[in-house]
Structure formats: C-alpha cells, structure tokens
Image (tube, helix red, strand yellow):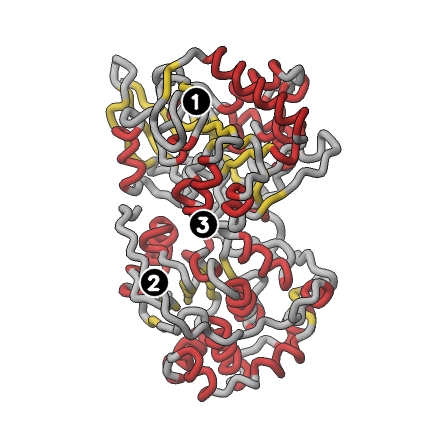
Amino acid sequence: MEKIEVVCPRDCYDTCSLIFTIDDSGKLKNVRGDPRHPITQGFICPRGVGDLKRVYKNRILYPYVRTGRKPGRDFKRVGWSEALDLIAEKLKQVLKNYGPKTILHLEYAGNMGLLTWYFPQRFWNAIGASKTDYSVCSKSGHEALSLHYGLSYGVQPDELLEMKLIVYWGFNAVVSAPHLWALSVKARRRGGRISVVDSRRSETAKRADIWLCPKPGSDVALAFGVARYLIEHGYVDLDFIREWTYGYEEYKREVLKWTPERVEEVTDVKWSKIEALGEAYGRLKPSATMMGFGFQKSIYGAESVRAVSLIPALLGLHRGFYYSNSRGYGMDISYLTGEKLYGRKVRVVSQVALAEYLKRGEFKFVYIYNMNPAVTLPGQKALRKGLSREDVFVVVHDTHWTETAEYADVVLPAATYLEKTDVVIPYSHRYVKISKKVIEPLGESKSEIWVMKELASRLGMSEVLREDHWKALEKAFKDSLEDGSFSDLINGKMLKLRYMPLNRYQTPTGKIEFYSLKAEKLGLNPLPQQYPLLKKRFILLNSSTFKY
C-alpha cells in the first residue's frame, strides 16, 4: 500500500487536500482528507470520495474518429498519430481558408490545475485562435467589485474564526463551500453569529441565527435598507470614510431615499428584520460579508454585488467581504497562457452568447477540453445545433464520455487529475501544494500539454511549447510564494501564497469609491441602483443533480 498526497482540482471554493491509497496492483484503494490542512481539515465531500470509482467508469480510453452524422456515438477507434494528423490537417485548412478567428478553443474549470488549464493555451494564443471569457460563472461580480474596489479579493477563510458576525449573502455555503461553513460554525461556538440573506430557505438559511428572505433581485434595496439603518444609528466609521473612501455623501443621499416603507415594499422583508441585521452589523465587530456567485448570475446581479460590498466600508473595514480571492495572489497567469508572448490580440467571445455564434457558423474549428458545454452553457438548443453543423470540425479532449463528445468529429482520451502531476490554486484560501500523480493513465489517455506539443509539431510551431512547463510555472509563481520557494512547493511542502494588502485599492482615487469614477467613465451609474423587478411568469427549473 502506498499513500499519495493530492489536491482536488474541481471548480470549488475549498480546494481540498486529499490522501489517496493505492494497493499493490496500482489501483485506487481509499481516499481521505488530509487533517493537516488548516482549511479543509481532513474531511471531504461525496464527489471526492466518488473519484475512487469515477476514475474507472465511462472513461474515454482511446482516440476515436466519427463515422456517422452528429450527434451520436458512431465512431471508429484510431491511433494517436492518425487522430492528430487529421486534426492538424483541418487546422491548416481553416487557417488558410478562413483565418485564425474562426478557430475557437473552448475550455473552462473542469480541472483547475495550472498546467492542465492554462499552459496548453499557449498553442491557441500563438495561432491567434478565438477564446471565451468565462462570463457564465463569476465575471459579473468581479466587474462589479472593480467599480468600487479595483480587484475583487477580500476576507481570507482562516480569518472567519475571529469574526463576531458572518453574513452569507446569496451564498449556500453548507452545500457549496462546506469547509468555509465549518469555520463559520467554529466562529459561532466562540460567540459569533451567522446571518443569511437568501431568497430561498437554503440549507445555510436553515442554520442561521437571522435569515432574511428578500424577493429575487431586490438585494440592492435590502442593502440600502441596512446602510440606512447604520447611518441613522451612528454606526458609520466617519474617520475611516474620510481617510479611505471617495463619494460617501453622494452615496448617503441615494441611500436615504430608501425609506423603511419603500424597502419593505420592494424586498418583501419586514423592516424589523432589516433593523436586526443592521444592529448585528453595527454591534458585532469584526464582521465578514460572504457573497456567493448565485445572486450575481441574474439580470442586474452586478448591481446587487456593488451594493452589498459597500456595507463593510461603512463599518470601517478594508475589504470586509468575500467573493473570490483569485485576483489577490499576484501570480502571472498570462505568462503561462502566453497571452503576452506572441503579440497577438485574439478575439474574445462571451460564453453567455456563444450558442448564437456557433449556430451562425462563425467558427469552423472548435477544440474543447476541460469543459462539457453541451450541458453547462446557456442556449442549449442553439449551441447543440451549432456543434452539429457539418461545416464545423469539433474536437473533444476529455476524460469521460460526455454529452459534448457526442457532437465531436474527433474524440481524444484525457488523463484525469489522478493520472498526472499539477499545481492547483484556490480561489478562497491561500494554501497551495503540489498535486501528485497517483496512478498510471488508463488506456491511451494523454495530458493536455502532450497533445498541444504534438499539434504544435505538426504545424511547424514546436518552439511555442518548447519551454519546459515546470520552468514556465516557476516564472508564473515569481515572488508570489510567502514562506518557501518554488522548489519547496514541487518537493511537496504546503506553502502560502503572498496576498495583496487589504488596504490597497486599484481605483482612480486609490480609495474605496462609493461613487465610482470608473463606472461614470463607462457610462454607467456611479452608484448602485435598484432596478424595477421583472413582473412576468417564469419557468420553474428543478435540478435533481447530486449536491456536494
């Protein structure tokens, strides 16, 4: 029996540290959480446990080329050379006849390992292929925070233990971030309180000391109600406002337009409950406002993030919120992807609008890895119709037979995170360690880097990926590790990522901007706005997917 340390690479807040056991035949035997990790603390979710079986089920083990019409599974097995030669030939044809903008590489966070996700993009950036902007996930919130704070980083998870008040706003942490929730429960045992703002009685709301249930889309009005209470009851830190903020008076005038009656009417929340939350904010310090991705994935969702994020500033807190900390680490991801290496400005397409681009046939070659867009992107009917076009050549490089693979002209077998070594960066905490290879790749599975190097060679572009990927990763990590070297990291030591100061604001004034000059320059309202709620009938979507 051998035990090997791994980091879960899923698109998840927690980025768990795992220990896999393999038996004498080299097969997975057991998995458990690493109790030494200060955030994930030795317990793991059902998906982590499920990988013991998932790695062996429904795998793509060999390259395949389509023999029938799309969609479907009419494929024949071929060798790697035949598959790669075909892909390279199609790439050459499209480059010659249509140009690089009609080539799309489509990937996302199916595996958040830096070498799996980012380094292969060097090939596509070198040829000038189009890419997508990841807007289907958290971009609205990042852009919203940029208007008032600059970068969107904030409270670190290990700081939760010291909080007297933790507010989960549109964030079902019990389900989506169980380790952050565990830290919050520890803080409550030390005398802290947990409040939840959610339009449904989520698992987290059920466990809250205070739960506010606003109408969907009324978060700005609710945040303004809380702000009004803080202003009127003398809880605003005016010294902090004078030194660290800009535009408070304009913001205050906007907030005071929201009378208790108006807030109640828009939010459907009793003013007494808003008073209770405001009083908790005012008296229980320090506090952390934990904003989830869910409530920004809606019309005017960015306005909600803007308004909620400014509550901590009233209390004299530097970035007293959490949304995502990925932009606070200072790593040079662009070096890994080669964005700045080739002097090309590539076309960027919104993931939200991608289905219509595909349906119109604007791309002649689509390479998909690390993603299952036939399930995850909006506009499913149009997207699947676009991938089905006979004039669009689709390649899917994946670990398992997915819905998207049924639209591929060529299917390639990918190695899972347990079959290769990588480094995963969290977007909540800042503990980083190497994720080691546990088992040999099944069948003829290959890594994304191997495939890109083979394609680069066939296109006469070997120099694009000539740099050793570990050397490239070391350069990307330059000056971003706090308590050790890159060599320490590669040799298995858990390190901390260097974190940007909380009192540094990348705004025009260098301060927290209640009145956003960037928004004004962009033609947006400089202050958060509560727009009228949509009054129409909606379709109820009831997901039955397994929670983790």
Looking at the image, do the residues carrying marks 2 and 3 touch, with CB atoms under 8 Å apart? Answer: no
Q: Which residue is mark 2?
A: 539
Q: Is residue 505 above or below residue 316?
A: above
Q: Residues within 10 Å of mark 3 (few under 14, many from 20)?
A: some
Does the rendering let one see residue 493? Answer: no
Q: Name the element at disc 3.
A: loop
**Amino acid type shown at disc 1:** Leu
Closest to the observer, 112 or 66 = 66
Can you give x and y, in whole percent of width and height, for residue 146 in the image?
Answer: 62, 58
Closest to the observer, 349 or 275 = 349
Q: Which residue is mark 3?
A: 378
Q: Is residue 465 above or below residue 255?
A: above
From mark 2 to mark 1, how far is it between C-alphas? 37 Å
**Which of the two discs, 1 and 3, labels the residue nearer the N terminus?**
3
* Rendered residue at 51%/52% (across/down): 138
Can you give x and y, in whole percent of width and height, for residue 188 in the image?
Answer: 34, 62
From mark 1 to mark 3, how far is it between C-alphas? 25 Å
Q: Which residue is mark 1?
A: 412
Q: Residues within 10 Å of mark 1 (few under 14, many from 20)?
A: many
* Rendered residue at 47%/36% (across/down): 387
Q: Name the element at disc 2.
A: loop
In the figure, is residue 341 to the left or right of 354? right
**Amino acid type shown at disc 3:** Pro
